[in-house]
Amino acid sequence: MSSTDAVTFWDDVYAGRPAADGPRPNARLTETVTGLGLPTGEALDLGCGEGGDALWLAGQGWRVSAVDISAVAVERLTALARAHTLGDRVLATRHDVQESFPPGAFDLVCAHYLHTPFGLDRSTVLRSAAHALRPGGRLLVVDHGSTAPWSWNQDPGLRYPSPREVADGIDLNPDTWTVERADAPRRIATGPDGRTAEVTDHVLLIRRTA
């Protein structure tokens, strides 16, 4: 399917939901940033969606570049950032990472649930993300490890690659990048419709050491 199909699909996904006044940040982002005591800096949010991660990071003092293939998501995040007086810390732009990678150097790149029914060379995208890190910066990749009841993909035969498999696919030089975390924790999540369910996250954290 074409890039135009992907844009239409994701625009329809977000347009079909009420705009969130205060979207929640992802749990694995908040636990990573606070647990490691990361100093504030420049962050890149790949697939920003409703913008919960970007807004939370900006509220902590980060400057955030947030990108999404959906113009609807980007416009909503821009409006929310202004409403929360964070417009000077959040730059949201429409970007198709399948075609090119956002420019810049970052202290944190996060990619939460960067899944799509359309063709996406994730390994290349995540490799570009690792190369966009400054020394000491971290790449946080959080993938689905199970299918939530509210997921758009309910294929019973769907297999989720492990964090180690994702790391192997990115194929980074261990002299320059170190895998700090690769596990599959569980948590109780709340979906867009308010339902709760136990889900598994596949968490990969990579640090650029040189």
Image: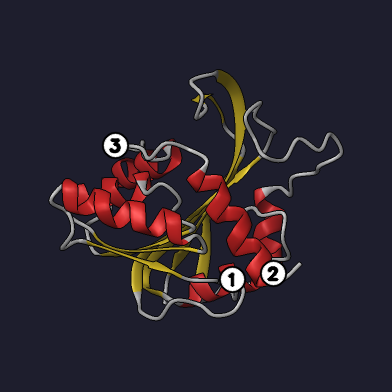
Task: Please tell me which residue is depicted at 38% across the width and 40% down the height of the picture.
Answer: 19
Kind of residue at badge 1: Val
Outermost residue on the left side: it is 85
Q: Nearer the viewer, mark 2 or mark 3?
A: 3
Which quadrant holds the N terminus?
A: bottom right
What sort of colour scheme is used for the picture?
A: secondary structure
Secondary element type, mark 3: loop
Which quadrant holds the C terminus?
A: bottom left
- Residue in front for this viewpoint, 192 or 200: 192
Q: Quadrant of residue 179?
A: bottom right
Which of disc 1 and disc 3 is earlier in sequence?
Answer: 3
Q: Quadrant of residue 207?
A: bottom left
Task: Please tell me which residue is depicted at 59% across the width and 71% down the height of the picture.
Answer: 125
- Residue in front for this viewpoint, 21 or 196: 21
Alpha carbons under labels 1 and 2: distance apart: 6 Å
Q: Position of residue 96 (x, y in %)?
A: 54, 71
Kind of residue at badge 3: Asp
Q: Position of residue 90 (x, y in %)?
A: 25, 61
Secondary element type, mark 2: loop
**Which residue matches tag 1?**
125
Q: Nearer the viewer, mark 3 or mark 1?
A: 3
**Which residue matches tag 3?**
21
**Which residue matches tag 2?**
121
Secondary element type, mark 1: helix
Alpha carbons under labels 2 and 3: distance apart: 32 Å
Q: Is residue 75 above or below residue 101?
A: above
Task: Please tell me which residue is depicted at 40% across the width and 81% down the height of the picture.
Answer: 103
